[in-house]
Amino acid sequence: MRFCARSGSSSRNKHSRQPLFQHSCRLEPLENRLLLYAVTGYEWGDLNVSASFMPDGTSSDGYQSSLFAKFDAIAPTEVWQREFARALQTWSTVSPLNFHFISDDGSAGGTSGAAQGDARFGDIRLGAHPRTDSYVAYAYYPSSWSTLGGDISLNSQSSYHIDARLDLYSTLLHEAGHSLGAGHSGSGTVMYSYITGVYTELTADDIACIQAIYGQRQADQFDAAAANDNLISATELSLDSSGDASLTADLISVADADYYRVSVPTGSDGTLSVSLDTRDISLLAPKLQVYDAAGNLVATADAGLAYESLVSVELTGLVDGEVYSILADGATDDVFGMGAYALDVDFGGTNTDPPTDPPTDPPTDPPTDPPTDPPSTDILPDRFEVNDTLATATNLGRLNSRSETGLTVHESTDVDYYRFSAKRAGTYRVSIVTGADLTLELYDTAGNLIAEATSQANGESLSISLTSGQESVLKVAVGPTDVTDAYDLVIEKTKGSSNGKGNGKGKGAGHGAFAGGTHVGQAAWEANVDQVLSLNMESDAWSTSMDGLGQSGSSRHAPADLALQILLAELGGGAT
């Protein structure tokens, strides 16, 4: 018989020795086993959850994070960071959740801001700081009102390892469960309070828990209509008047593969650009292949181990009416071989909308009688604020052309950054139309200045050659006169690629690689209740008393609405 989930922790109050939560159970005629998982009632509203790594020195829970100093001494940065990505992606494989990484500006933990979707740092932030007790890690449940929700802290005093106890991946897999809203469970599960080895996967109980919170991962709209897992059953794509097709879809498992079929449109210049993008979408390491009508492989791009990245191919010499099939797949056979993605297909020479030159002077209105009271001359922040750094640049997406009006440099210290990537290889012109002396600069993603336009004319323009998928960052700021003003931004592709050739490879720009881990002995605590924690591991035992979260004699409490903060206890202060 199957028993229902526990409603909370079984820890006892140190004064009354009574359970803090009652267990409620019911019988169901399902499989013959105990269901031990516990859901907490906390969950993320948006299923695309961001994550970030706290820079060293970031203030968190009264400590300074030393995450990079700690783990760079254990393994290369890309290795230990991949362990965190692998832990998150493991939960993604059995739920509709997708994860992506963003930069972290080092704002203090719990700083005011959006509980989810704050551009300054991830919804889930990973940090590390020293503790004088035996806890090796703790995490906050998701929150609907605090940026602290979901954050994970590792004990920098503990001795972590890759694929050995104390295993980093196993620790993060457990803590990520709490960051997603899972409570503790029974023996033999990832969410069990005691850990006895290196974890390699979730158990049926862990899977049931996360699916009780978020549901199961569902087939995308194309597979739901008719499975497109092979060349024969490929989904037919309809092109727009420009010869383009763009879509978002999902590889719901490592075994899933998505095929699409397109025909070269009449009037094409014989070129085809295809890209498969998982940046800001999921941790899928993408793989892209193109086949001709006979099933012969004619182009391929593989991201290798680079999860959350972009791959693209370009073909030339195509003939109107020819049929090609496109495969969107994972580049690996592990957890990074699944996830959501964006596919973009673009045949050249079919765009009937020629680029237009931006006006040389800003439009003027006919004179009118002056109002009784002069209007306010204040320039207000535009809709994209705050986009004042490379890290917080407004993402304009993948494009051939785009215009944004009503933008402002509203004060002399204001700068506006915009990020975009080229839909096709060619020459792109970037212009700002303004009545003041503003400057326009173009950077690569590493922050290196590529081009600039700083004349004192009312408006700036520059041109640059970009490859398909190449990303660039624009910066708009006041000029030497420090005059602020409103402006319009225009980006347009003016010429095609001169050689018609693609790179034949993925960019290889991802977040690198991670390796596995475990943690030892853990206990949940109620944020505003004193309690005695007693932990056992195999035949050993360890116990301690706590006031709130602090050391002996302290009384630090987490915000009540965050409920539980989860800690892991390492026996005797050392890993086994």
Image (cartoon, rainbow, N blue to C red):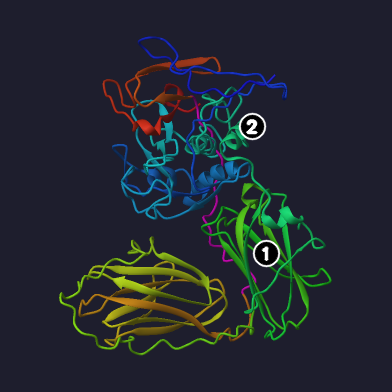
Quarter-wise, where is residue 501 in the image?
Answer: bottom right
Label 2 Cα crowd, 10 Å radius (few <14 / some 14-19 / many 20+): some
| Rendering coords of residue 271 (x, y %) | 67, 81
The Cα–Cα distance between marks 1 and 2, rounded to whole angstroms, is: 32 Å
The disc at residue 381 is: none
In this picture, which residue range is highlighted in magenta? 503-521
| Rendering coords of residue 443 (x, y %) | 40, 73
- As for residue 112 lying within the magenta part, the answer is no
Q: Is residue 517 above or below residue 441?
A: above
- As for residue 508 lying within the magenta part, the answer is yes
Q: Is residue 203 above or below residue 389?
A: above
* SS type, badge 1: strand
Disc 2: which residue:
203
Disc 1: which residue:
288
Query: Which three-letter amino acid code belongs to the residue tagged 1?
Result: Leu
Query: Which three-letter amino acid code belongs to the residue tagged 2?
Result: Thr
Residue found at x 70% / y 71%: 238
Q: Is residue 315 visible?
A: yes
Q: Is residue 345 visible?
A: no
Tell me: 91 left or right of 526.
right
| Rendering coords of residue 26 (x, y %) | 62, 19
In the image, farthest residue toward the top: 16
Residue found at x 48% / y 18%: 10
Quarter-wise, where is residue 66 in the image?
Answer: top left
- Quarter of the picture holding the N terminus: top right
Predominant SS of the magenta segment: loop
